[in-house]
Image (cartoon, coloured by chain):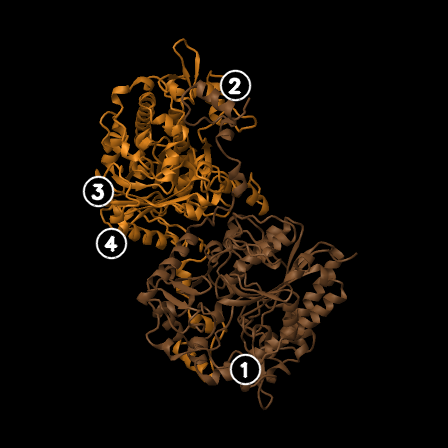
Chain colours: A brown, B orange
Amino acid sequence: MPHADKNILFIMCDQLRFDYLSCAGHPRLKTPTIDALAARGVRFTRAYVQSPVCGPSRMSYYTGRYMRSHGSNWNNFPLRIGEPTLGQHLKALGVRNVLVGKTHMTADDEGMERLGIPKGSVIGVEAAQCGFEPYERDDGLHPSRPGAARPAYDAYLETNGFPARNPWEDRANSGIGPDGEKQNGWLLAHADKEANIPEEHSETPYMTRRAMDFIREAKEDGRPWCLHLSYIKPHWPYIAPAPYHDMFSEDDVQPAIRSDLERQNPHPVYGAFMDMRVSRNFAREEVRRRVIPAYMGLIRQIDDQLAVLFKFLDDEGLTDKTMIVFTSDHGDYLGDHWLGEKDLFHEVSVKVPLIVVDPSPEADATRGTTCDALVEAIDLAPTFIEHFGGTVPRHIVEGRSLKPLLRGQTPLDWRPVAISEYDYSMLDSRRTLGRKPDECRLFMVFDGRFKYVHAPGFRPMLWDLQTDPHEYRDLGDDPEHEAVRARLKEHLLAWALTDHNRITMPDATIETYGPARQLRGGILIGYWDEAEVAEARKAYGIE
Amino acid sequence: MPHADKNILFIMCDQLRFDYLSCAGHPRLKTPTIDALAARGVRFTRAYVQSPVCGPSRMSYYTGRYMRSHGSNWNNFPLRIGEPTLGQHLKALGVRNVLVGKTHMTADDEGMERLGIPKGSVIGVEAAQCGFEPYERDDGLHPSRPGAARPAYDAYLETNGFPARNPWEDRANSGIGPDGEKQNGWLLAHADKEANIPEEHSETPYMTRRAMDFIREAKEDGRPWCLHLSYIKPHWPYIAPAPYHDMFSEDDVQPAIRSDLERQNPHPVYGAFMDMRVSRNFAREEVRRRVIPAYMGLIRQIDDQLAVLFKFLDDEGLTDKTMIVFTSDHGDYLGDHWLGEKDLFHEVSVKVPLIVVDPSPEADATRGTTCDALVEAIDLAPTFIEHFGGTVPRHIVEGRSLKPLLRGQTPLDWRPVAISEYDYSMLDSRRTLGRKPDECRLFMVFDGRFKYVHAPGFRPMLWDLQTDPHEYRDLGDDPEHEAVRARLKEHLLAWALTDHNRITMPDATIETYGPARQLRGGILIGYWDEAEVAEARKAYGIE
């Protein structure tokens, strides 16, 4: 049995910055496999996630809907039962939507119980796994916590000769100290250590092999697939196996993108974020120099593993049959802007790498090009639906298919602004700012030049990326930019007021409605007398 | 077995204007029973529905959520599966949420099928009936349409000696002409006819008896109940049984609330609405004079039936145990403002009667008073939850409990504006205005004086009810009211950006989260070294 004619390999990294690829200009980190991928497709230079943190960003990727629509505002906020997913749309097209790796999905157990959906049933698994068929689910964070579910990767390590109390933590995510002693891999100070595991057994090669396992097995099944290979790196714990742990050194660390200007009277929310432990640590040069080489090593490892994977696709004859997408769920501040982690809207956090290789001949003209249209993470779901010949249900899916862009056309009505959201209610900053859980929302509106951040309860933030590409100067209260802020705020209002919960009623059904259908249905609204009805019946051609 | 100690009788009329009650000042229509109810409780003078049309208004009543949140934007737009309902909240409190009459609920069949929920199961019925236990469901519109489900009322009429092809249409909603011939009750010209049914068998007394049937049966069951007695009158077909059909005459018809000013260069959407058949007909004085006496008769009939019902409650010893709520799902233009039906935001359409009688002694001080706080239909669900001792899940239910207002306290942070929405995609006006289905949203923001209507794609509308209580002068493009519009638009933005889909994560759970819990869970974010962790463990009191 041959492979299906059309498949999608949807590769996601976790916490990979847009600029840590050589094709995106990194001067020291070489990523030849990813660069070659870009040479075969389109690299989007302005791709924005819908929330700069794992959970909500991914729920947007997997539903094609903004965070305000899917409602899963932060990591481990369950995705409400009934929320339509990409998997559901693909299933209707006869396509398997399969997971290898991380989704950060939390099931809505309460909702499932209320609706009597058994967790173990096919429907229950689909609902609990965000529309994925979980070939292997692994969210990549498995601390030693009583009662925590263990990943299959733990058993793999044990079977392969690496038994431990917690193989994920003690082996793959611990370091080896100078005297061979185990070092806590969660700690930034140990980021320069070699991981306590041979490279081939570390997480990235393991997941790559699991993806290949699935692809081999899928051949038997015959149905087309969308495989989400969702790597859990270069996300922390920042610790890389040899030889990646010392492939890069302090000399490869680029200067931090930060300015003293940013610490002078910062926006209160930004200020609170700068004051978090992770930010205070990353503000130290010592920390950056210790961590960033490991971060680069983990990326280089992914690049090398992708070479293995792409070779496999070639060998299987799948390269011409497979759309390949490479992206990330958000970036990583790594000390830029005096911040660690993600959570805010500077480019290094909210912008992601996005490369799409469409194997169809219609996309030949754009191979090796870049596209700077404003693209959102939610655009992938509709792209995938279209790729498999489906019609995008526009009353549900809020993103737009990238298909025209992949074929060199930018629709005249392409979105004027990219939107991203953040809910900081789960951050320590909520307390330091004295906010209630429902008062912690931030909204980014970016038009390609000006980035406006609406922060209810506070003044807005504003950066002009044309005159200030590093986003140092917050113009949020600059009187000269009043009109810019007002304009972007209008976009925000328009966006906020668009339908996003009217998901049971397609536009096409609405379009068939009207007085003729009403009259046919026997419901007479506002008719005076028999003559008027007769006249209307005649006008509408009703016998 | 005695009746449960606490119950709610939630009475709703359909299309009853706020001002067609004598307690609300109608000069000719006497409604002594409803007036007496008001004398026992609080009459709210500024109660606004969340959408001035049956379906979405009711979905807001039954969920406690705005239309943008429940997404059922118009009649027969299915309520998405999993959308939390009042019934679900009451069930958790051991309370039956029971229906006699109309809900206008359309089940999300597709969603139910996708999730494998059998329609006939207890859970399936609950989901399909918007959280109600349907003691008797009757939406009150049963035209002769092949394959249409017939109401139990049809069988009732047949059993009681009124057989017909369509008993609902041919008997209860047809008129008797001068020569005894049947007249089409859908037509406004026949509104002065006597309905083709003896009064005792018409819909309002029938539904009243069904409510009493339920209450009698519920005594056996013993659980407390919230009974939604949902009359389908005075909604059209405007046809009343004797003696109500000629209880009122043209002399009782009040002058239309309308001004030629309104037809001069009207707002495009308002203009399109004025141009609909029902509006053009109601703009004729002849039509008003024919229809309004029947409308008044139908209301008077409800008042008389409520007298029967309240006597029954007395006899059953339920009066002191039952909170009674009387309201409507929206008003009726009846030719005011050159409009028929509802659909726009003038007071006669969007404002409803609302009387609440709380039998508890703490409410004694407010009996017979009026309250002019800005109240929304979504406030009832939380009021009911609190009445039964529940805690309102504020991340789901968007209304606010009226309990403090019923006890004479207006919270300092009571809402500054009332919000209502309308989706005109299903009106003929969508076509005449050249709008796509997702471009037909209207939003009202009313602060008690100024009523602002945001109309994407058009200029806004604005009325100053202080200087122009009849809402004749649209200040939507008046330069002098720029600041007022800007202020109300800010309220709209704030409302639009509030969380409304984060329904799986309660505020209280968010509040327990923080770095201590993270550290306990073994997830170390941003710590530099062992000393820092030890220090933090000490600071958080973790062993």
Q: Nearer the viewer, mark 3 or mark 1?
A: 3
Residue type, numbered disc 2: Arg
Tell me the CA gap for discs 2 and 1.
Answer: 82 Å
Residue B190 lies, in percent from the top left, at: 39, 18
Q: Name which of mark 3 and mark 4 comes first in the sequence.
A: 4
| Quarter of the picture holding the C terminus of chain B | bottom left
Question: Which type of secondary structure does the marked residue at label 2 adopt?
Answer: loop
In the rendered image, which residue does mark 4 sit on?
Answer: B412
Most extreme residue toward the bottom is: A179
Tell me the CA gap for discs 2 and 3.
Answer: 53 Å
Question: Which type of secondary structure does the marked residue at label 4 adopt?
Answer: loop
Chain at numbered mark 3: B
Residue at x-position 50% and y-position 21%: B166
| Quarter of the picture holding the N terminus of chain B | top left
Chain at numbered mark 4: B
In the rendered image, which residue does mark 1 sit on?
Answer: A191
Question: Which type of secondary structure does the marked residue at label 1 adopt?
Answer: loop
Instruction: Tell me if mark 1 has few (under 14), some (14-19) or many (20+) residues whose alpha carbon lies within 10 angstroms of its own.
Output: many
Chain at numbered mark 2: B
Residue at x-position 53% and y-position 58%: A378
In the rendered image, which residue does mark 3 sit on?
Answer: B466
In the rendered image, which residue does mark 2 sit on?
Answer: B165
Residue type, numbered disc 1: Ala
